[in-house]
Amino acid sequence: MKGNIIKDVFFDLDHTLWDFDKNSALAFGCIFDESHPSIAIGNFIEAYIPINQSCWKLFQYNKITHEELRYNRLKHSFDALGYSISDVEINRISDQYIDILPENNHLFDGAFEILDYLKSKYKLHIITNGFAEVQYKKMNNAKLTPYFTTITNSEMAGVKKPNPMIFEYALDLAKANKESSIMIGDSLDADVQGALDVGLDAILFNENKSDTFTNIKQINHLLELKKYL
């Protein structure tokens, strides 16, 4: 694929460039150290990661609201630990978490190196299902913003990946053609299949090496993008 036809490269943000799990653990650690010191952060994060992913999947397909996502992922995690906590306190922690989360700025290994490499060759863009204000803070604090020509979030587009309309919105905003564009993200469903369904090429960032897919392009480290771009 390495050739001259690609002009625009679209990235997902969370779990692709921005290390959500690491930054999330730091945010919860800060909150629990202050107000719930008996919670073992490692045990909480072990429960939280799959629950959060499950809630995001429901949110992605409009099966729960933004407010239900923020509440349910915490409530179900505390329930999994058998930790008794009030709804008022869950909502307080949820607000704290949203405030603290974007203050952390850990990126996946090789993020800046690959962005520096790509920026001289292509126009770079973001397509994210995350909430606009939080995503902008993440990108600014992590010094990612200058790399990207456009940033599309689901609030702007009115729909979430893998809905084809968010990809069409992003392409229009970027003044890009799908035939000369490619999407890179960690979600097989939202990022890769969503892009392929509208005619964009796509690469799966399979950092956890959780599955092996023979019919799609995939990388396990960001610097492996040099094989394709």
Image (cartoon, rainbow, N blue to C red):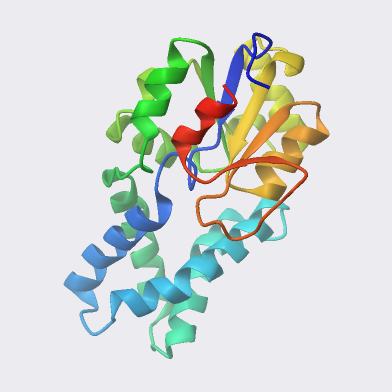
Question: Which image quadrant: the C terminus?
Answer: top right
Q: Does residue 181 appear to the left or right of 140 in the view shown?
A: right
Q: Quadrant of residue 157?
A: top right
Q: Quadrant of residue 4?
A: top right
Q: Residue at x 35, y 42 (%)?
A: 107
Picture coordinates of residue 132, whole percent (x, y): 48, 36
The answer to whether residue 11 is above or below residue 34 is above
Could you say where residue 69 lies in the image, as x and y percent from the top left?
56, 61
Q: Nearer the viewer, residue 46 or 78?
A: 46
Q: Nearer the viewer, residue 133 or 143?
A: 143
**If the image is split into quadrants, where does the N terminus sit?**
top right
Residue at left offset 67%, top offset 55%: 212
Q: Position of residue 167 (x, y in %)?
A: 70, 28
Identify the image quadrant of residue 59. bottom right
Q: Is residue 224 visible?
A: yes
Give me the residue at 34% from left, 56% from top. 22
Q: Is residue 166 above or below residue 148?
A: below
Image location of residue 225, percent across then percent down: 53, 30
